[in-house]
Every structure is written in structure tokens, then in C-alpha cells.
Image (spheres, rainbow, N blue to C red):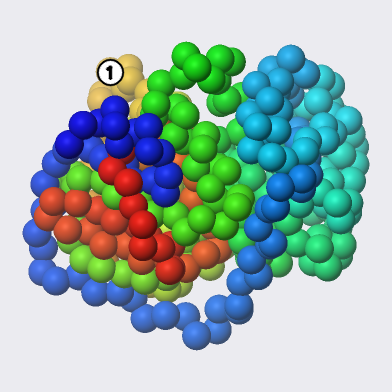
Amino acid sequence: MDRQRFLSSLLPLTIGVKGIARQLPPAHPAARNTATPVIHIPPYLQPGDIVGITCPAGYIENEEIQPAIQQIKSWGFNVVTGSTIGKRDFTYGGTDEERLQDMQTMLDDPSVKAILCARGGYGAVRIIDRLRFANFLQHPKWIIGFSDITVLHSHVHQQLHTATIHSKMCNSFPQDWSKASLEQQATILSIKEALIGSKMLYETPSSVYNVAGKATGILVGGNLRTLENLTGSKSDIDTAGKILFVEDTGEYPYSIDRMFWNLYRTGKLKHLAGLIVGGFKIKEDVNEEPFGRTLYEIVSEKIQEYHYPVCFDFPVGHQKNNYALKCGVEHSLEVGTDKVILKEKGASKSVTV
């Protein structure tokens, strides 16, 4: 089918890459964790609602967020920018106190219906334990971002049982929308669709390394390094009975192996319903003694004793095809010999991209 015609249709979204799934003995969903609490879904946005932009981690200049502001307004929403926009304390978007206060203001303001983190980098873990969520629980809102913002996704899921949106941030919006690729436009528009309550559905042809099967569970995950760093803290996610997705960038093969061993040894891989491996930008191994294992071999080694579907090369992560995912929301994962479908519960309409 004509790629350009489908891409221009945009949403709800389905994404594609070529490949053939590896056929193993029939995979089956893990037993659901009956102790898992009900997840609260923040109200979806209506025209005129306010999206707040803040920097809980890395810094960003005011001019850099203008394309995001322009695009969000074109969707019919209003925008308020936090006090951390334009501030800088070395790598951070202001001091810890400034970032803490700005994020707290966004959380406490009932008129703000969604909080878009301007960029990732590093810094959310430095303020997470001092944030107060009492008003957020009274007036839940969508928290949006990825990379270092995995701290917030994980904490809000584990402690507050509230859904969030894993997606691109302000520094990924195109300067000139008319010149952006259809893929870039589609990834940005997936944020809008998630915010207005569209049921997300993604489809991608299988990788030869996939493990076939079907699963249903709550979708959780994010940046692998960040998830590893949260191990043992109160932000550490319980993955039992859930569909876990992971992605990362700028890591050596041995480091990725170590992180997956962390998932294995902490039991996070044992009782999964399914595993989604997104984009991994791996540093070239320059050691005199190469590590000698690919990403696929690293993961396969850790999950060989389990029987659930596994999908590689899913379009999420530090890359152009980084689509919005609703963390904490129930999804089904179907890994077949020709395609992979990740579908939010209740989704029916799809467009091939």
C-alpha cells in the first residue's frame, strides 16, 4: 500500500518494519497479579484546556519550546510555561529548588490538565521524593515525557496508581511543521491523540528475533537505565502480570547486558505478561576485548526460561519513530509471524504507517 497516503492519515497509528517472527512453543500470558490496584485515568483534554510546560530535569531555552507551544495551540489547547523555562544550573533546568517548586506548582494547579516535560537529560530523581501529590490525587492530570521522565512514570504508577503518557517532549517538535517528515508529524500527533482519549493501536511487522504469543496486561516501562537506577526505591515498579517496554541510548553492550541482568535478578522478567524492546542506540564497542553479544542475544539469554511474547525493534525510544504510549493503561500484545499489534483496550480503528 502507498506509504505516503497512509502516513498522511496519521491516527490512530500503526507502525511498520519488515521481518519474520521466530516461532517458539506457544507463548501464553502470565497470570494476572490480582493484588494490582485499579489505575486512575486522568480526564482527557477538551478544547481550551491548559497544558503546562516545565523542566523537572534538563534545561531548555524559551525559543526552543516555541514550536511545541505553536503546535499544542493548533490542537485547541492553551499553554502555560513554568518558571524553569530558560533557567539553567549547569545541566539542570534551574536548581533543585527551582525545579521542585515549578513542578509542584503544575501539580497543584487544578486548571492545568496536562504537564508536558520540556526535555529529559537528568534531574527528576533529585526532586521526586520531595514532590507532594495530594492535590494531584484530587485533580489527576497527564504527565508527559520520556527518558529521564521515566522517574515520574514509574513513581506515579507505583505510588499513585495513575496513568501517564510516555512520548516525545518539546525538544522533539519540528521547527517548521510543513517541512517535517510524515513520520515526525505522526509521532507528534500521537501525543494529541493520547491526550484527547483516542484508543491507541500500533502495528509493526515482526522482527526475526521476536517470540510469538499473545498477552494482556497493564503497560509499564521506559528508559532501561532509569528503571535500573530506581531498583529498591519506592518508585520501583512491580512488573508482575504487566507488559513491560524498555528503551535506551548511548550505552555499551556490556552495560545493556548488566541492566538486563538487573531485570532478571530482581524478578522483573519472571512474571511478565509480555516484553517490548524498543529502540536501543548502542555505543560502538572499542575495547580490545569486545563484548561479543548483540542486543537480541543479551535479551534472549535472560528470557529463555519464560513463556511470554517478546517484541524487538518497537517504535519507542530515543529515535524519530518514538510514538506515544499510555503507561498504566491495559493493553493487549499480539506477536505473530508477520506482524506485532500493541492495542489499548477498546481500540478498533487502525491506520498503517
Residue 255 quadrant:
top left
**In this rendering, would 290 be left or right of 254?**
left
Asked if residue 97 lies left or right of residue 13, the reply is right
Residue lying at 26% horizontally and 40% vertically, measured from the top left: 16
Nearest the eye: 112 or 171: 112
Q: Can residue 266 be seen in this view?
A: no
Q: Is residue 104 above or below residue 293?
A: below
Number of on-image labels: 1
- Between 155 and 8, which is closer to the camera in this rendering? 8
Q: Quadrant of residue 254?
A: top left
Quadrant showing the C terminus: top left
Q: Where is residue 332 in the image (x, y as percent from the top left)?
A: 36, 66
Q: Which x, y percent locates residue 214?
A: 25, 68
Residue 264: image x %, image y %?
38, 59
Q: Residue at x 73, y 56 (%)?
A: 141
106 up-or-down from 330: above or below: above
Q: Residue furthest bottom?
A: 34
- For the residue pair 318 and 67, the one nearer the viewer reads as 67
How busy is the neighbourhood of tag 1: few (under 14 within 10 Å), some, or many (20 plus)?
Answer: few
| Residue labelled with disc 1 | 288
- Residue depicted at 14% across the width and 41% down the height: 19
Identify the secondary structure beneath mark 1: loop
* Figure check: 326 above or below 8: below
